[in-house]
Image (cartoon, rainbow, N blue to C red):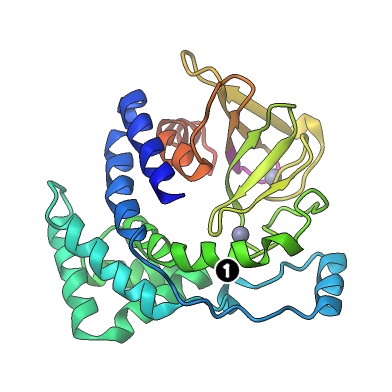
Amino acid sequence: MVDELLKETERLIEERPLAREALTAFRDLAALMAEETPRMKGAPVDERLQDIKREEGFPLFARTDLPVDLDSAALLLEKFLTTLQTRERSDREGLETALRACEKDENWSRNLFSIALNNDQEALVDIAGGVNLEAQTLKFLAQMALTPSIHALRDLYAPQIDTDAWDYRYCPFCGSLPSISFFDKTGKRYMHCELCGLEWRFPRLKCPFCSNDDHKNLGYFDVENHEGFRVDFCRQCGHYIKAVDKRVFEKTGPMELENLATLHLDILAAKEGFK
Ligand SMILES: [Zn+2]
Ligand SMILES: [Zn+2]
């Protein structure tokens, strides 16, 4: 699985020069993730409770209740920082400071993981500022460090989740919002979870951020020379989501990679005033 991911990353690095920097960093981290085997702390889910949750539209877990292996994530974060600070990056010093913070006090990374899972933007800016890193960079590293553990849990519970019968804008497994979306080969629309990577079916004409389905307030734009990619936006809440149309491509990369390989679309969307 990770070998495949690494191969796909290499392919996209060649194909998408604009995203080379983001993808190269991802490749370095994915190679380290491949070595990590998190402990599984999954517990059997009470089926009746699960039925109730599904009917009421609750995800199986809240982000903060995910039984992740924090020891393994902390170890991985240290490996990430150790590797990345040897690269030619403008934030090398910040990465080194973060590494020292991890080594000095194990609570530092625990606190960071809890902030990332809580989606606490203010605390994130604070802790990132303390080590002189961009908040987005630190959040990305924390999420990547948690990924092997979260993916293992997701795979354990996925057979119990009907991703075609879930009509909500957040992930049926972990309750997170989508990071990117896609149309499959038959034109069905799917959302890709920003945290656990689960993909669930979603109506074609509906905003995944505010549930607005008034087509007059929904729209999209695409980019010249980038057939197969577009940005869907909602005028009601001002949010946007990128979409990959798989019908246009013989092969697409895993969505977490496509998300990184289409950063130019995020820049365009921001210029258009969407968030
Ligand atoms: Zn999820
Ligand atoms: Zn909206």
Position of residue 147 relative to residue 111, above or below, is: above
For ligand 1, tell me if the residue under mark 1 lies within 8 Å.
no
Front residue of this view, candidates 250 and 24: 250
Residue at 60%, 19% (x, y): give it. 248
Q: Where does the image place residue 16, in percent across and percent down from the top left?
A: 36, 26
Which range is magenta? 236-241
Left or right: 201, with 104 as reference point: right
> Along the horizontal axis of the image, is 112 left or right of 81?
right
Q: Position of residue 28 (x, y in %)?
A: 27, 50
Q: Residue at x 36, y 66 (%)?
A: 36
Image quarter of residue 219? top right
Report x, y in % for residue 197: 56, 53
SS assignment for the magenta stretch, majority: loop
Which kind of residue does numbered mark 1 sit on? Leu
Q: Is residue 93 above or below residue 211?
A: below
In the structure shown, which secondary structural element does the residue marked by tag 1 occupy?
A: helix
Snapshot quadrant of residue 234: top right
Q: Nearer the viewer, residue 181 or 118?
A: 181
Q: Would you name the residue on which mark 1 appears? A: 153
The residue positioned 85% from the left and 68% from the top of the image is 56
